[in-house]
Image: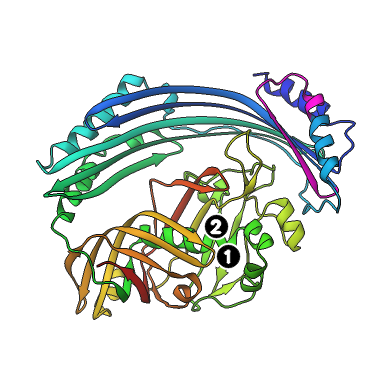
Amino acid sequence: MDQPMDLRHRMEEALTGHNADYVEIRIEETAATTLSYRGRELEEVGRTANLGGCVRAAYKGGWGFVSFNDLSGLQEKVQLAVRQARLVGKEQTILAPVEPHVDIVGLTLKKDPRGVPLAAKKRMMDEYVETAWSRSSKIQTTTAGYSDSARTMSFANSEGTYVRQERARAIARVVVFAREDGNVQQARAAFSTLTDYDALTGRHAEVADAADSAVALLAARAPTGGEYTVICDPKVAAVFAHEAFGHLSEGDNVYENEKLREIMVLGRRFGRPFLNISDGADPGVFGGLPGAFKYDDEGTPTRRTPLIKDGVLVGRLHSRETAGKLGEEPTGNARAMSYRHQPIVRMTNTLVEPGDSSFQEMLAETKLGIFCKDWYGGSTTHEQFGFSCAEAWMVRDGRLAEPLRGTTLSGNLFRTLENIDMVGRDFEWTESGGNCGKGGQTAQVGQGSPYIRIQGAVVGGK
């Protein structure tokens, strides 16, 4: 890859003389290391490196997109994207304004994963896998993985913006499966960091806890399906906010769905006055979280965006185009999986803001209900959502009672938001973060919440 100043000059030179309303160039260099385990055996070691870029051009509302692995002939690639845009453009290009800016954002790492020998990474994962297997003869198998990655993105557009931005991440995960008489249960431990490899080390106790949880679930029973008062731990509450509400706040979903535009009207009340939900990537506020970065993949500065304030819908997430079409401000939420993809509107770090209640108060005020801890998969279809709880317990007369397995939560988002009657003060970020899928792309996201209590939540079981 060129030296930064040489690359900037080439990008800015390629952006001259075009015949379009708007043009941008994004160049990316990535490197990654992965270790994959099946059972006790190391199954695969991988090292990958990629260098490529893309050009996106707009003309009369139409877009042209060209991706490439060869950085030569940038001006010709710009011209090709412009020709594509001119073939389809028939209306008006509407992009919310963003002040042009020039910035270089480097990495600040306490311990760089790229400087850690591969043998040390393998030794750490070997120990975690053996820790899981050592907990019980009922452990059937494990799957585990380690990965670290680094990405350097250079962005320039025809309005004068130039941004060079570096990001890195490392993650370790162990999933434990326990079996008894045909009954199989699972639990997991996962850790991630953007700043310090040592944050992944010395986590044996949490791996052991995951193995113990998988074994304990073998003796649990499935709940009787129905409506319950449900207390969600911070991980479950956070994934609810992400899956059920966050996707409905993405500007492209709102703009492209007439029914959703009629529902997601700014100023409409969706919850009680103590309910507050936000999203943001500004590293000054969210530094260290998976969805933290200074500029999105359109070069727009990121920020914290309130979505629900005091129970009322006050904002949504935008690219420049969706903000322009809906007459709102861009929020820095345009993200692309790689240079092979166009940016789309994505969440970054989504959170339910802390309230005034405690977990013990929620328990004490629940005569009959269910407490859900951690989660597995989740999905949403418009206002309908569903996801699985990793662990759960019945609540009887204000106390945790028998453990449950196979517990799912589902229902209508808007009814569920209205039924949140307590929000805790003990806020937690979900450390493992995760990857969120949309439109054939994945993006690193963070999510956090305090405990919440929901009345009349729909619980699936036997």
Q: Is residue 180 left or right of residue 430?
A: left
Between 218 and 323, the residue placed more toward the observer is 218
- Residue 296 in percent (x, y) is at 64, 44
Q: Which residue is mark 2?
A: 279
Side (left or right) of 370 relative to 31 = left
Amino acid of disc 1: Leu
- Residue at mark 1: 307
Give x and y (percent) for residue 116.
38, 23
Q: Which residues are magenta?
A: 60-77
Q: Is residue 261 magenta?
A: no
Looking at the picture, which amino acid does disc 2 mark? Asp
- Point out residue 393 in the picture as x, y percentages from the top left corner: 22, 66
Question: Can residue 260 be seen here?
Answer: yes
The answer to whether 48 is drawn above or below residue 307 in the figure is above
Q: Earlier in the sequence, mark 1 or mark 2?
A: 2
Q: Nearer the viewer, residue 68 or 1?
A: 68
Q: Residues within 10 Å of mark 1 (few under 14, many from 20)?
A: many
Residue located at (77% from left, 43% from top): 63
